[in-house]
Amino acid sequence: MLQIGNAIVSLDVIEKKFICDFGKCKGACCVEGDSGAPLDEDEKAILEEIYPDIKEYLTEKGIEEIEKQGTSVIDADGDLVTPIINDKECVYTVFENGLALCGIEKAFLDGKITYRKPISCSLYPIRIEKYPEFDAVNYNKWSICGPARELGFKMGTPVYKFLKDPLIRKYGEDWYNELEYAAENLEEIYQIRR
């Protein structure tokens, strides 16, 4: 593991290869799973604020569930997450040509809002666990992402490079540059510490 600022970064983030292969997975991460997308505390207020602006992008079922549950919920594990429909897709999921897309992101791309989508969605396959003193930045291996691992391996793209923009969005450019430096000099860093 590496410590970058207040984050402890798993070496898997540097060593594992990954590039989303949307043509093969078709956005399954928006539909599969036992809970909604994890949310940062400030995202709860953001979702409440932007809901009127994104409503036109959502499905009837999604709107119905948001009206019932709210724009965010606490799941069975006590985590703040996006609500889901019938224990399946996220309420913000929309379907086009057999692909699961994010209604929030569609509104962002149309210039209706400045918030792209939950940072946990942008950062996947990285999952961040918050502790009082630090964030644990880990790689999450999920079976539905097999094609992404294959493509990442074929292209030689590590997780942290694939996720450069969302990592900068989360931690800032200086933080990312430090991570990149550490990744590129990992062997040397470990020899110095021995």
Image (cartoon, rainbow, N blue to C red):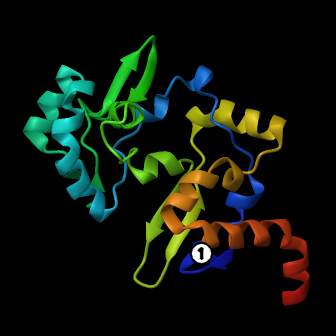
Residue closest to the far top? 97
Q: Visible in this render: residue 79?
A: no
The residue lying at 74 percent from left, 52 percent from top is: 16
Q: x, y percentage for residue 122?
A: 49, 47
Would you place residue 122 above or below residue 151 in this image?
below
Q: Does residue 188 appear in the picture of this structure?
A: yes
Which of the 4 image quarters holds residue 183?
bottom right
Up the image or down, 33 lies above or below 166; here it is: above
Q: Residue at x 61, y 72 (%)?
A: 175
Q: In which quarter of the image is residue 44?
A: bottom left
Residue 28: percent from the left, percent from the top?
Answer: 48, 29
User: Where residue 30 appears, x then y in whole percent?
Assistant: 41, 33
**What residue is disc 1 on?**
8
Which quadrant holds the C terminus?
bottom right
- Tell me which corner region of the image, top left, top right, bottom left or bottom right, holds residue 152: top right
Query: Residue 174 at x, y = what percent?
Result: 63, 72
Does residue 71 appear to the left or right of 89 in the view shown? left
Left or right, residue 127 beside residue 108: right
Does 16 sit above or below residue 21?
below
Q: In this view, does 21 lie to the left or right of 135?
A: right
* Viewer-nearest residue: 90 or 183: 183
| Quarter of the picture holding the N terminus | bottom right
Q: Circle 1 sits in a helix, a strand or a loop, which is it? A: strand
Three-letter code for the amino acid on which mark 1 is drawn: Ile
Q: Residue at x 71, y 38 (%)?
A: 149
Residue located 17% across and 21% down the image? 60
